[in-house]
């Protein structure tokens, strides 16, 4: 990314798209349990973790169960080999923590929980490949998987206004890279212009000020 990067609609998920995918993840989880479908269970995990942590595709594929810290007072994961070989800690919310606990219990019940097991696996492999991960994602979202990371950065900044926090969670070396998420998303701009128009309409209803008083 460079200084010309902008929050165009194709680069991140708007609030409606984000909500729809989160609802889809819940639906997949319930359906997966009911129909005993491992594929749907794993797809639910892909959607939830991608949107709830902002991990890069390779980071999500490389994530092991041992990298999760979800005990009492702990809600974070450790990226062991991020971009440039860097390690970082990524915190997440209470809802995702509860979900991951349920998923790990499911993995244990299905004989998938070992000290070295990856968080995600396929029918034939102990670990998801980046291409396989992308195929599962695009089954539910036409936008790139990286849009989940852009969305995480955008909404984390919108909700906290803490650019340093965003930098730490995303693992950016330069704060200038993270600063792109402080830009105004299109829907924020649209809401601002609507507010502006409401203000101008209200002003037009006021008694106009004589021109000589404005001089």
Image (cartoon, rainbow, N blue to C red):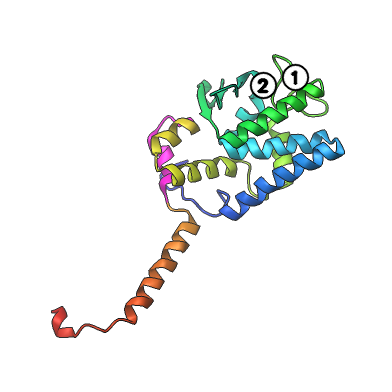
- Quadrant of the snapshot with the C terminus: bottom left
Residue 189 position in % (x across, y down):
44, 60
Does the magenta run of residues contain 143?
A: no
Of 117 and 9, nearer the camera is: 117
* Among the 4 quarters of the image, the one containing residue 122: top right
Seen in the picture, residue 127 relative to 138 is either above or below; the reply is: above
Q: Residue at x 40, y 38 (%)?
A: 163
Seen in the picture, residue 197 relative to 126 is either above or below; the reply is: below
Furthest-right residue in this view:
35
Q: Residue at x 46, y 50 (%)?
A: 6
Residue 85 position in % (x across, y down):
53, 21
Q: How busy is the neighbourhood of tag 2: few (under 14 within 10 Å), some, or many (20 plus)?
A: some
Query: Disc 1 on helix, strand or loop?
Result: loop
Query: Which residue is tagged 2?
Result: 65
Seen in the picture, residue 57 relative to 107 is either above or below; the reply is: below
- State the extent of the magenta-drawn residues as a range: 171-183
Residue 213 position in % (x across, y down):
14, 81
Distance CA(mark 2)–CA(mark 1): 8 Å
Query: Disc 2 on helix, strand or loop?
Result: helix
Seen in the picture, residue 103 relative to 71 is either above or below; the reply is: below
Q: Do the residues labelled 2 and 1 touch (CB within 8 Å)?
A: yes
Query: Which residue is tagged 1?
Result: 113
């Amino acid at each position: 990314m460079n200084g010309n990067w902008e929050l165009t609609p194709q680069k991140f998920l708007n609030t409606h798209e984000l909500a729809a995918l989160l609802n889809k993840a819940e639906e997949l989880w319930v359906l997966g349990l009911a129909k005993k479908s491992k594929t749907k269970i794993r797809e639910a995990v892909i959607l939830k973790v991608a949107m709830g942590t902002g991990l890069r595709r390779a980071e999500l594929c490389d994530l092991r169960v041992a990298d999760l810290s979800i005990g009492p007072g702990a809600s974070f994961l450790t990226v062991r080999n991020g971009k440039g070989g860097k390690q970082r800690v990524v915190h997440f919310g209470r809802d995702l923590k509860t979900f991951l606990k349920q998923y790990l219990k499911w993995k244990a019940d299905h004989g998938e929980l070992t000290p070295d097991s990856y968080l995600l696996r396929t029918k034939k492999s102990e670990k998801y490949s980046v291409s396989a991960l992308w195929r599962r994602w695009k089954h539910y979202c036409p936008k790139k998987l990286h849009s989940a990371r852009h969305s995480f950065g955008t909404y984390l900044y919108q909700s906290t206004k803490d650019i340093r926090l965003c930098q730490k969670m995303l693992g950016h070396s330069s704060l200038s890279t993270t600063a792109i998420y402080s830009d105004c998303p299109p829907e924020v701009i649209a809401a601002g212009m609507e507010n502006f128009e409401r203000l101008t309409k209200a002003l037009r209803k006021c008694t106009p000020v004589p021109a000589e008083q404005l001089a």
